């Protein structure tokens, strides 16, 4: 049976006042890992090929080589995962190779933990054709299960009765709530979720409803208005996402400041109130220069200074006082701890305050 277009499914659900837009039924079920398929459109996915427990054992015992496995599984430009082994077959020292290695490290760490304790949060799945199941959330956990127990093993999963309508929103909700996930993945997940909400808004208009407000959108994404504004600003220009994909380590607050300052400077310089496509391209180039060029005037050196401490009493106070409770006029929640200049200013203020106490 041919699947209905996505927007038509949303319209049908809204017309029927179906709860599946917010709450969908699920069960917990034990499934073989070999019956599960990753989602290659998910920001948490990387090009994985799963190898049998037998071949993994042969590789670990050095009875089969990486070259032989590459040929057997056609694994060039992929990462092979099996019990107790992960083999990076992407081009050596390429950007893909470096990114894959970072993910591999986190998978091995999680897999080692799974080997000695239970997985606290089960990955979520939904059924697809041929008695297979696709991962909705929890790609890294699934890869870690393969590494820890083998591709032929079974594990407990949260299984939806059918494919959820708002897949990208659900994926973003999980990405946004995890502090240990790369910033690049969060930005991509946000963009995908917003695209899904745009389709949802079109469907709402078709059935006589209003578009979701910004506040309602943030609520549906499971984030605060402040976090929504951060994501919204950072996804306005493609160079920001590209910079994070290439390994940019700036905090979102710091990058957001660069974006907003670049926009403001451009609008003032060219007396603009509304930006067209050409304007945004020019601003994108300006932001890119700041995010990628270490010699750019606005980038900061990786060192901080806050002057000399003259009193032993000041050192003692610095080590024993809860400086966050001092009346310094500092909004601690707004401090960018990845910005060396900001940290230097904060520490200078703290030391100066302590130096002048009786």
Image (cartoon, rainbow, N blue to C red):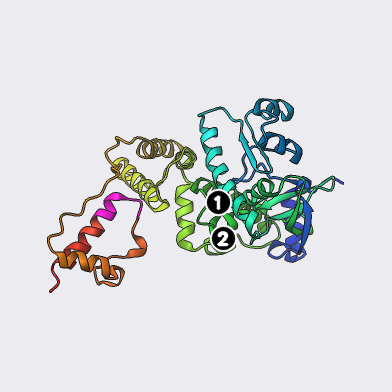
Start and end of the magenta stretch? 337-344
Q: Which mark is residue 280?
A: none
* Image vertical order of residue 196 relative to residue 332, above or below: above
Mark 1: few, some, or many residues within 10 Å (few <14, many ≥20)? many
Which residue occupies the foreground of this view, 289 or 86? 86
Q: Where does residue 335 sit, x and y in percent of width and height?
A: 33, 59
Give the labeled residue for mark 2: 217
Main SS of residues in magenta: helix
Query: What's the residue at 73%, 35% (across, down)?
Result: 55
The first of marks 1 and 2 along the sequence is 1
Residue 339 among magenta residues: yes
Query: What element does badge 2 sit on?
Result: helix
**Looking at the figure, which quarter contains the C terminus?**
bottom left
Query: What's the residue at 55%, 51% (across, down)?
Result: 190
Give the labeled residue for mark 1: 190
Q: Where does residue 284 sit, x and y in percent of width and height?
A: 42, 38
- Of all residues shown, which one is farthest toward the right? 1
Query: What's the residue at 24%, 65% (across, down)?
Result: 318
In which quadrant of the rendered view does residue 77 lie?
A: top right
Which residue occupies the foreground of this view, 282 or 206? 282
Q: In this view, does 262 lie to the left or right of 187?
A: left
Kindly report which numbered mark, 1 or 2, lies closer to the viewer in this rendering: 1
Query: What's the residue at 22%, 63% (across, down)?
Result: 350
* Image vertical order of residue 286 relative to residue 179, above or below: above
Q: In this view, does 54 lie to the left or right of 352?
A: right
């Amino acid at each position: 049976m041919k699947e209905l277009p996505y927007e038509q499914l949303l319209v049908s659900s809204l017309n029927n006042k179906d709860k599946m837009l917010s709450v969908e039924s699920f069960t917990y079920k034990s499934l073989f890992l070999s019956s599960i398929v990753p989602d290659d459109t998910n920001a948490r996915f990387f090009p994985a090929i799963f190898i049998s427990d037998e071949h993994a054992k042969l590789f670990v015992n050095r009875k089969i080589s990486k070259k032989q496995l590459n040929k057997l599984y056609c694994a060039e430009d992929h990462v092979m995962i099996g019990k107790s082994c992960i083999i990076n077959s992407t081009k050596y020292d390429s950007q893909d190779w470096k990114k894959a290695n970072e993910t591999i490290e986190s998978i091995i760490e999680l897999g080692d933990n799974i080997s000695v304790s239970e997985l606290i949060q089960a990955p979520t799945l939904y059924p697809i054709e041929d008695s297979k199941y696709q991962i909705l959330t929890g790609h890294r956990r699934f890869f870690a299960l393969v590494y820890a127990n083998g591709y032929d093993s079974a594990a407990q999963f949260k299984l939806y009765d059918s494919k959820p309508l708002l897949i990208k929103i659900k994926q973003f909700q999980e990405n946004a709530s995890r502090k240990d996930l790369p910033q690049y993945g969060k930005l991509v997940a946000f963009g995908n979720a917003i695209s899904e909400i745009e389709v949802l808004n079109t469907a709402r208009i078709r059935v006589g409803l209003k578009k979701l407000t910004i506040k309602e959108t943030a609520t549906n994404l499971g984030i605060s208005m402040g976090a929504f504004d951060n994501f919204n600003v950072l996804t306005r220009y493609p160079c920001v996402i590209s910079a994070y994909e290439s390994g940019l380590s700036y905090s979102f607050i710091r990058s957001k400041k660069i974006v907003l300052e670049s926009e403001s400077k451009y609008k003032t310089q060219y007396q603009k109130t509304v930006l067209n496509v050409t304007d945004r391209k020019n601003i994108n180039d300006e932001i890119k220069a700041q995010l990628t060029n270490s010699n750019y005037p606005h980038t900061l050196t990786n060192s901080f200074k806050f002057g000399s401490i003259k009193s032993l009493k000041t050192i003692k106070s610095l080590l024993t006082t809860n400086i966050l409770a001092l009346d310094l006029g500092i909004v601690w929640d707004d401090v960018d701890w990845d910005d060396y200049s900001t940290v230097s200013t904060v520490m200078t203020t703290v030391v100066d305050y302590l130096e002048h106490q009786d």
